Image (cartoon, coloured by chain):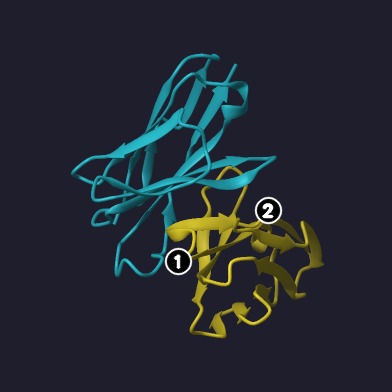
Amino acid sequence: KAGVTQTPRYLIKTRGQQVTLSCSPISGHRSVSWYQQTPGQGLQFLFEYFSETQRNKGNFPGRFSGRQFSNSRSEMNVSTLELGDSALYLCASSFPGSEMITDTQYFGPGTRLTVL
Amino acid sequence: GENVEQHPSTLSVQEGDSAVIKCTYSDSASNYFPWYKQELGKRPQLIIDIRSNVGEKKDQRIAVTLNKTAKHFSLHITETQPEDSAVYFCAASGRTGGYNKLIFGAGTRLAVHP
């Protein structure tokens, strides 16, 4: 099976702009989680989508949002970009089993966002 | 809130030696503990994971142990090789924070010298 893919791989934006990142999960996987990776804060959970519904949310401001489509592909959007939003944004997909356990997550290559 | 502490932050070993990385979690309801390896410029790759109903799991040169009472888990790499050099992240997840929400440690940079 093809792995998790993310587009674009690199983005350069200026403060105040908005950006949309895309994630295509492994075929058959219905859960997509998003993480922000920075040298200072490490890997931080943004949100998780399952069956087009946000199921979990991390501690990020409302400028960070996401959605999931019926084919399980997911997008995340960051509005009013700030310098501190520069990071590697990673998505991970998993095949959901019971709703009472955490599924193994497989990461995509990430989108490197630079805010100038 | 949930927290995962990881030690050491850097680890340098000679090829063939063993390496041990330790993590402590705060949420006693955590029940899933994966380890990821991230090479420079690459995506995190799952190397091994363990659930709370198991105390130890092994896969060739890699093993993970879990002590639920003390709320800590460890990664053991034996017979290290230069290609083991990378940043290793532990993570925890469970009922309190929400399933599929991984809380990561800060990472350990492992350098294996030939």
Q: Nearer the viewer, residue B27 or A77?
A: B27
What x and y, as percent, mark residue B101? Answer: 46, 56
A114 is higher (above) or lower (below) than A60: above
What x and y, as percent, mark residue B14? Answer: 81, 68
Disc 1 element = loop
- Indicate the colour of chain B: yellow
Q: Chain of mark 2?
A: B
The residue mark sitting in front, 1 or 2, is 1
B114 is higher (above) or lower (below) than A3: below
Identify which amino acid the numbered label 1 is placed on. Arg
Point out the image quarter for the C terminus of chain B. bottom right
Q: Is B41 placed left or right of A28 in the picture?
A: right
Q: Chain of mark 1?
A: B
Whether residue A93 is visible: yes
Q: Earlier in the sequence, mark 1 or mark 2?
A: 1
Per the rendering, the mark at residue B95 is: 1
Marks 1 and 2 belong to one chain: yes
Query: Which residue in the protein does label 2 denote?
Result: B106
- Indicate the colour of chain A: cyan
The quarter holding residue A19 reads top left
Identify which amino acid the numbered label 2 is placed on. Ala
As measured in the structure, the alpha-carbon distance from the residue carrying label 1 to the one carrying label 2 is 22 Å
